[in-house]
Amino acid sequence: MLDRAKAGKFAYPAINVTSTQTLHAALRGFAEAESDGIIQISTGGAEFLGGQYNKDMVTGAVALAEFAHVVAAKYDITVALHTDHCPKDKLDGYVRPLLDISAERVARGENPLFQSHMWDGSAETLADNLAIGQELLAKAAAAKIILEVEITPTGGEEDGVTHEINDELYTTVEDALRTAEALGLGEKGRYLLAASFGNVHGVYKPGNVVLRPELLKDLQEGVSAKYGKTAPFDFVFHGGSGSTEQEIATALENGVVKMNLDTDTQYAFTRPVADHMFRNYDGVLKVDGEVGNKKTYDPRSWGKLAEAGMAKRVTEACANLRSTGTKLK
């Protein structure tokens, strides 16, 4: 999938999900766009999936992954399963146990449970970030898994990890060279690189964020000049919600193969539900001693609308990222 995206200068939407319903919405959106794609679960999403009784991240992630393996077979597309941002203090309770589970599966001759995991060391020094990255990359490669690394901060807030919006949100060529030296360029295991070019999680009003996707070309050329490998990095576009079509197009030209989408799809899922509740106020609530209307408060009635709304936004993302109609045959 990644090789095809890079060669064709398109990228896969990586859709965060927090339930079986949002999973189906993402799968439906990909299928309707005839695009392959990436389904991902953040630490907060996994905790939510684990249930509010014990909030176990590994249980939540494993449960949805197993469910996805079953239901995705009914969609005529290929999807990869990924775990999103995982900072240092959550590695032992999330990524490392999941890597162990996949290693056991591979040892039995099965495929890994997830196809990729993300290590978010952006809050650490680059030296510490890359040292942990080396350890995780070796384990991931042994389990036939791709690692995603974030080497410099992405602004805004994601599952409690917050970075200011300032000039530090731009990865330098020196940062990229140090990454290539520590993690290699594929020979130690394949990885995706979340470099920073002004990215911010969430959606901000125009003028608050200055994206510079042309910076990715500088990183590619800087490392290529030293190692002689053309376009050595597979880049990830974090904070993709609210980006302009031109910003996305420039990023694709410079090696982005995956773009995360969460805020926009959350809204697309919730907006039809809010509309349903407002339109059917006296049906979803038992007002003034009445009995309400079961057909309107049945979760399926508004859940179908939510799924359709989110699926539509996923198809739009596929169009923006040029992945529409590119599914593996």
Image (cartoon, rainbow, N blue to C red):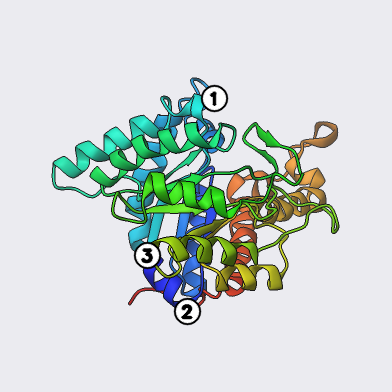
Could you say where residue 227 lies in the image, as x and y percent from the top left?
39, 61
Residue found 46% across the figure and 47% down from its top: 179
Q: Are marks 3 and 2 in contact (CB under 8 Å)?
A: no
Locate residue 154: give its quadrant.
top right
Could you say where residue 256 lies in the image, as x and y percent from the top left?
53, 64
Could you say where residue 240 lies in the image, as x and y percent from the top left?
65, 57
Marking on residue 78 = 3
Asked whether 324 or 74 is in front, the reply is 324
Report if residue 77 is visible in the image. no
Q: On the rendered image, what quadrant is the N terminus found in?
A: bottom left
Q: Amino acid at mark 3?
A: Thr
Q: Residue furthest left?
A: 108
Q: Residue furthest top?
A: 54
Answer with mark 3 or mark 2, whichever residue precedes in sequence.
3
Is 249 located above or below residue 54 in the figure? below
Q: On the rendered image, what quadrant is the C terminus found in?
A: bottom left
Is 32 located above or below residue 43 in the figure? below
Secondary structure category for the residue under label 3: loop
Direction from residue 165 to residue 221 in the image, left or right: left
Could you say where residue 18 lies in the image, as x and y percent from the top left?
54, 42
Answer with mark 1 or mark 3, whichever residue precedes in sequence.
1
- Spatial CA distance of label 3 from label 2 is 12 Å
Residue found 39% across the figure and 67% down from its top: 228
Asked whether 23 or 299 is in front, the reply is 23
Say few, some or many: other residues with alpha carbon within 10 Å of mark 1 (under 14 / 14 to 19 / 20 or more). Answer: few
Marking on residue 52 = 1
Report if residue 99 is visible in the image. yes
